[in-house]
Image (cartoon, rainbow, N blue to C red):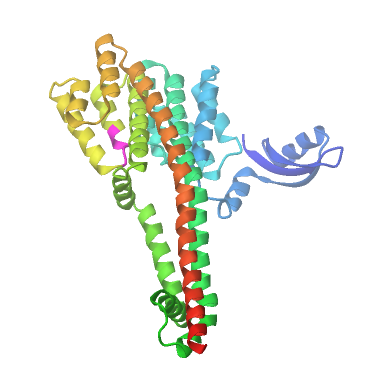
Amino acid sequence: MPGFQYKALNAEGARLQGVVNAADEREAARLLERRGLSLLALAPAEAAASGRLGRRRRLQPRDVVLAMHELSTLLASGVALAEAVQAQSRSAHHPRLLQAFESISAALRQGQAFSQALLATGLPLPAYVHTLVQSGERSGQLGKALHDAVAQMEYDLQVRGEIRQALTYPAVLVAAGIGAVVMMFTFVVPKFAALLDRAQDLPWLGWAVLNTGMLARQYWWAVLAALAVLALGLYRLLRSPQGRARLYERLERLPLLGPWRVEAETASWARILATLLGNRVPLLDALALAQAGVRAPGRRARLEEVLRNVRAGSTLADALEEQGALTATGYNLVRVGERSGELPAMLGSLARLCQDSGRARMKQFLALLEPVAILLIGSVIGLIMIGIILAITSANDIVA
């Protein structure tokens, strides 16, 4: 039954909007009147969605996670798959998600498997989601498999959000400091440029500060161009998968930030592997999917060697220890899990340990990052002011 987007007023005069399902516009209007609503506007939901499509923001990972979470909740509540998907296709999600669930619903009516229909939508889902859905279909536990996939997606989203939130204030601080330095060199320092003509024997620092200010004032367009190129280069680096991979690789070599990144990667790898194994995905397939989610090229290469060694007959703990992929605690947990048959539970414990340790290191890193950034910016501004003062005092000495 088609849906119609409406805008109406209730008995108290409050403005309402939503979607009503009806055979045609006339029936939709009658349904709204029976609810005591005064109709203001009525249009097919598909047309309203397509009209907003160009103005809506692009699909975000949070939108996908929320939609999949609602679907897994419906399945866990005992709702049939076809009915749950159809309910999602009528909910007020992003237009792309509406189209995806409508295509899944049509594919299910044609007898297609849910995993194939989900893959055909092209939604930005991690590779392990499709594997978990397929394993859930085989085992008859699709709801549990989808719930585990959503839990892992929420964890990945949480980690990215924590990192982004943690770096927001230092990034704003550094940007503000750079802007303050540029403003001083461009507008403040040139005010004292006359000292260059009146004094020939200025201190080196004063001469350098004044000349730099004059050059910045004269070639301001070059300064802006350099900053724009730097910003564009950083943006392209962060947008490029290869650039991000190189950045992650270098971050792991830093003294304090490196262990944090390693523990965050290890926690994510262990959680994915535990989730896959808990849903009866074969070990070799689970290892391949888990190592594909690791971002640092060097660590991913070591995990690929682990996969080869396990395929050749080695135990997972021995293969990990041979490549130096974990800590001593991690090797012990994996080894105990293999011997007891509780490998998913032990990997889950390893993920929680690394997650807690990583958060502690992140707090320690941030506690040092902010004062260091303030110190560096203050030092640069202080050098500029000292240079100006030295130039002024030197000129006064010469005049006297």
**Bounds of the magenta span?**
291-295
Viewer-nearest residue: 213 or 263: 213
Residue 135 appears in the rendering: no
Left or right relative to 137: residue 49: right
Vertical relation: 64 (above or below) 174: above
Left or right relative to 187: residue 311: left
Viewer-nearest residue: 2 or 349: 349
Name the residue at 46% across, 29% down.
150
Viewer-nearest residue: 236 or 61: 236
Q: Quadrant of residue 122?
A: top left
Q: Measured from the top left, where is residue 366 in percent x and y?
A: 46, 43
Vertical relation: 340 (above or below) 10: above
Left or right relative to 313: residue 17: right
Q: Is residue 74 magenta?
A: no
Viewer-nearest residue: 154 or 331: 331
**In the image as oriented, which residue stretches furthest toward the top?**
340
